[in-house]
Image: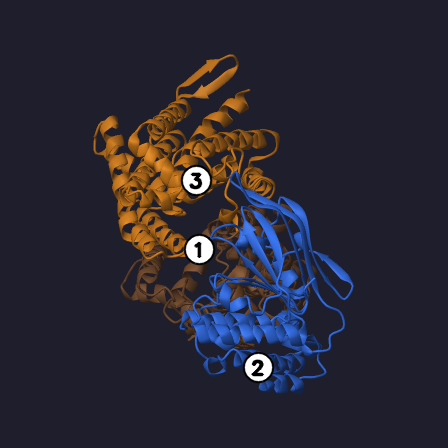
Amino acid sequence: MNTQACAMMEKTTGTPLAQVYQASSPSRVRLHAEGLSIAFGGQQVLQSVNLDLTGGQIALLRGPNGCGKTTLLNILSGFIKPDTGSARLEFNGTRVNIVKETPDRLARLGLARLWQDIRLFPTMTVLENVLAASPHAIGISPAHALFSLGKVKQQEREFRAQALAWLDMLGMADRANSSGDKLSVGQSKRVAIARLLQTGSKVLLLDEPLAGLDTDAAAKLVEDLNRLADATHHAMLIVEHNHDAITPVCDLCYTFAEGVLMREDMGGKWAC
Amino acid sequence: MNYIYHLIIYFEIYAIVAMSLNLLIGYGGLLQVAHAAYYGIGAYAAALVWTKLGWGFFPGLLGGAFVAGVLSLLVSLPAWRFKGDYFVMISIAVQTLIYTVLYNWTEVTNGPFGISGISRPVISNYVFVTTGSVTLLYGVLLLGLGIIMALLKWSPFGRALQAMRDDELAARSIGIPVDWLKLQAFALASAMVGIAGGLYAAYVSYIDPTSFSLNESILMLSMVIVGGTGNVRGPLTGAAVLILLPEALRFLHLPDAIAANVRLLAYGLLLIVMMHLRPQGLAGTYRYQ
Amino acid sequence: MQILINGFLQGVLIGGLGLAFALVYRTTRVFHLALGGLYALAPFVLLACLTTGLPIGFSIGVVLIVSILLALSLEETIHWPFARKRAPTEVHLIGSLGAYLILVQSIALIWGNENRVLRSGVDTTWSFLEITLAQAQLLGAALTLLAVIALSAWLSLANRGLELRALADNPVLVSLLGRNVRALRRWVFGLSAALAATVAMAQAWDVGFDPHVGLNAVLLGMVAMIIGGTGSFIGPFIGGILLGVLRAEVVWFGSARWQEAVTFILLGLFLFFRPQGIFARRVRLEENV
């Protein structure tokens, strides 16, 4: 993260939010999947897929179009259930069974995903889009929204600072008040990533984050994601066609071939 | 002058109805046609509290709001699994079911004979007997509820609702508790329209099931679509149009017998024209994406 | 046994309407509320024809033509323009609602709100094996059954019919293959109107009619579609028969008051435990998300 963002973050110390981004978090998060299989309409899309990812690691997921990469992300983020197999999220000694959870609960527990088709909220501004992802907002309960105005406003101020910091890191802070449906693909993508980061999730599943970005913007984004992984031990699973941009920073490489996933360690800091 | 007060009172009641429906449709994207049923539940519950239990004005209103809010589970739970057309179908079913109960559970609701003898509001021994005083009282309540709506709209709750409305899948993926949100939205909206029902009962002093039918729900939906949703002006405009349209028709010397039909016909036309030319309604901001 | 037969006869009518509703829903995803308006109109046109002295066969023909033409105009002015703009389902639904209001209120303005009958006097009855059946009931059910069989045969055998089934299963593919989707949609709206009009006339011949029967009828058709499953065309018809039989049993064992409640409880049970209906078809996961 850049120094300005770090400075903004320091201003909000004392809230649980800040601890999430502290560089010195104790244990690392882990995403582990075993034997995931699913078939659609007679076609076996995933065949006994295994996957293991720890905090601080960046994994590239690649394979031909339509081979099941997005399906795997859908399963890992709780949007669809596999036919067989298991997947779990581990952090702070807790184990969460992904297959049994709803997607929103997983996002609150620390696993969030980026959509290939971006999916910003079209009637909200860029800033509101990011703010919508603020974790554990007490104002989300109407009772609190009406009767705890002071606390809600205080929390909103913190969320706002955090959101602007993420937007700044991604170069979109000056467009904070633009409408969500009036951005270019590259800009929308960056806002979507900021929104993802705002959730505070440590496990990030990114579906084609670089599509629509020019070479420089893509390189900068990859660099930022890498620093994030180093500084705060985010675990990232990245589906991407632009292999060249990602391979310099990725620790693992998963390749899809006919529903089966093959794993390659790329050297780097966390090679197993 | 009394007649003007009468119109204003109806405007105030329907403005509350419109605001509550706006919470569901405008902020939450939850199109449904069961609202009149909850209007009816609020009216009946309040009327029973007043006539059978003899309790005060506000306890009656709150009783109506509470019962309506709890029964909103009939629509909010199905909303977990069903969207769009299917959900509208279910809301039609719930509306008809509740209407059937109101009509047939004669032991409690008196069936088609309704409940009569509902008195005007009484607060601390002051009886709001004149239409002028009722206008003032209901105006204050409308203002209060309006402020609550505004607070909710700009709160994280309102933001989460709008996110859910825009893209439910994306909202889930960033941790927004969509299912829980639906429960809250329906409970709030139903409680609010339940209050409107109580206000209606206290003003007209006699209620029967025919005021709370599917046709009434359709009228409420039309009111909100024509007026517009997504902000405060839209619902208010919708309520104003609803109240003023029959008056305008009267100017055209249309006999009262067919006025109701002409009004609904006009709404039918307006709905189609609006969807073509101005989907956000006359004064709203939200249009279907 | 009598109850069973009565229920079956009524069920054939409900099934016919379910098929008419499903015909439009499966192929265009339009929630054809306006079908209720067409349903309500048919007996009135029939009565008008008969009172001007036209023979019965000719009158029925006029009714069918009027219904088909109206349905086609709805498609041309509301649903096709919205479909081209890729409007969300809510917009179609509101448009259809507007059309329903226009149709029903027009009927009320022209002919009044009262209940009417198509024939006078006591009906002839047929008895065998302790079962007594009214001629009107039998005729109506037979006519509807014939129409349904003819339609099913056409769907299975005629080229257009097969194209229609393809459209229901995979709209994108059908348009990609160059088939004229617009023409197919017109066929769908026309056929469903003709079928609905037939059912309406059958029911009106038996028990009479008024401008407001349409909504309840469409509701039953919709429930029949859900029970029978949206994956086929014949499913809704069977669902309708089942619904008719169950309703008749409830009237017998319980009370007529709660007949409507049973319909919706059944709807609720199916939606929660078997939303794909009795005749389920394996649906792609993507369609459900």
Disc number lying in front (1 or 2): 2
Residue A221 placement, left or right of A23: left
Disc ID at residue A165: 2
Give the CA distance from mark 1 to mark 3.
16 Å
Query: Does residue C11 appear to the left or right of C35 in the view shown?
Result: right
Residue that carries the numbered disc 3 in the rendered image: C217
Give the letter of the blue chain. Answer: A
| A270 is higher (above) or lower (below) than A2 | above
**Residue C156 visible in this rendered orientation of the protein:** yes
Type of the residue with mark 1: Ile
Chain given the colour brown:
B
Of B257 and A132, the residue lying toward us: A132
SS at badge 1: helix
Vertical position of residue B37 compared to residue A39: above or below: below
Between B96 and A87, the one lying in front of the other is A87
Pointer 3: residues within 10 angstroms few (<14), some, or many (20+)?
many
Which of the two marks, 2 or 3, is nearer to us in this view? Answer: 2
Q: Which residue is mark 1?
A: B218
Q: Amino acid at mark 2?
A: Ala
